[in-house]
Image (cartoon, helix red, strand yellow):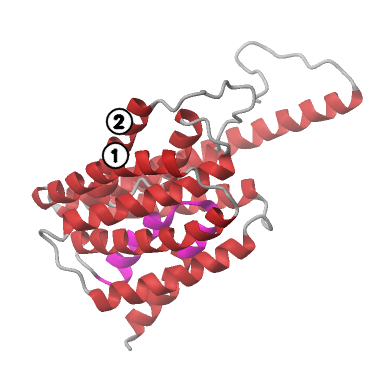
Amino acid sequence: MSATLLLTVGLAVLIGVSLGLLGGGGSILAVPLLVYVAGLPAKEAIATSLLVVGATSAVGVLPHARAHRVRWRTGLVFGLAGMTGAYAGGRLAAFVPAAVLLTGFAVMMLATAVAMIRGRRSAEGRPVPHELPVFRVILDGIVVGLVTGLVGAGGGFLVVPALALLGGLPMPVAVGTSLVVIAMKSFAGLAGYLSSVSVNWGLALAVTAAAVVGSVLGGRFAGKIPADLLRQAFGWFVVVMGVFVLAQQLPPRMGLGLVALAAVAAAGTVTVAVARRRRREQHSGQQRLGRPVREHAGTGVER
């Protein structure tokens, strides 16, 4: 076994850890790993990542199902719609240049990172729909599936919020149900890619096995690490990876400019995050002391 294969399989454990801990993020790690470490062509890497993430998600859903954290009807409706979009995206990818696919993947990475760093707003106080908005779920499933089939990304971090908002699912149930959806549309996207791309099955199975082991490890640590700290740390890691992938697809000068711009944006985001944290701490301290909290226009304390 070559050193490159050993490194690829070792790092693949992180794909499963991400899925086990966060309910998503597998494809965000899988595609760069397969392209820049394993040395696969972009389209083969995307196809392989769909297999890895699909299989790992299918295994990861089992403990959620045993704990009754899967809404099967919602997951199957969303998943079947996602499969349609993912298969179409996989077939369409044959006509899209590899550089365009990697650029789209990098943009998806950055969008995912921003969503992770900002965090999800609390759903408390929001009305929960009594009936599942089937049309909206199908439409969102097709769109999310199309993105997944094309660039191999857009899994849990798009599916979980959609299930929570459209289906009115509690967050733990949305995470468990999302794994059903991710598995279904990943396999459909892979089927679309196989019409034009060949897969190194030996490498794919080795990476998949390592990711499954990682998902078991991630599941054991879930709940033992502060969720906000874990999510934001992973978000910044994805920012770095996204900028790197995007810079690789641009001319050298533009790539350096992008890195500089990303550094400035990161510094600004950190400054804003620190300021917001201080306001929240001040707000909490005043509430404990029983003092009224004054909110100024445009700078109200976030919920």
Residue drawn at the location 31% of the way across and 54% of the way down: 186
Residue drawn at the location 53% of the way across and 54% of the way down: 65
Residue drawn at the location 21% of the way across and 49% of the way down: 101
SS at circle 1: helix
Task: Bin the neighbour count of mark 2 within 10 Å (Cα to Cα): few under 14, some 14-19, many 20 and up.
Answer: some
Q: Position of residue 251 (x, y in %)?
A: 21, 50
Q: Where is residue 19 in the image (x, y as percent from the top left)?
A: 48, 57
The amino acid type of the residue labelled 1 equals: Ala
Q: In this view, does 20 lie above or below 5?
A: above
The quadrant in which residue 43 appears is bottom left
Q: Can residue 105 be seen in this view?
A: yes
As drawn, the residue found furthest toward the top would be 297
Choose the circle earlier in sequence order: 1 or 2. Answer: 1
Segment tinted magenta in the rendering? 16-39
For the residues labelled 1 and 2, say whether their Cβ atoms are less than 8 Å apart. Answer: yes
Q: How far apart are marks 1 and 2 (CA)?
A: 7 Å
In the picture, the disc for residue 139 is 2
Q: In the depicted view, which residue is nearer to us: 145 or 99?
A: 145
Instruction: Look at the image and say whether residue 283 sits in the magenta stretch.
Output: no
Instruction: Look at the image and say whether residue 26 sits in the magenta stretch.
Output: yes
The quadrant in which residue 125 appears is top right
The amino acid type of the residue labelled 2 equals: Leu
Taking the image as shown, residue 267 lies to the left or right of residue 9, namely right
Disc 1 target residue = 81
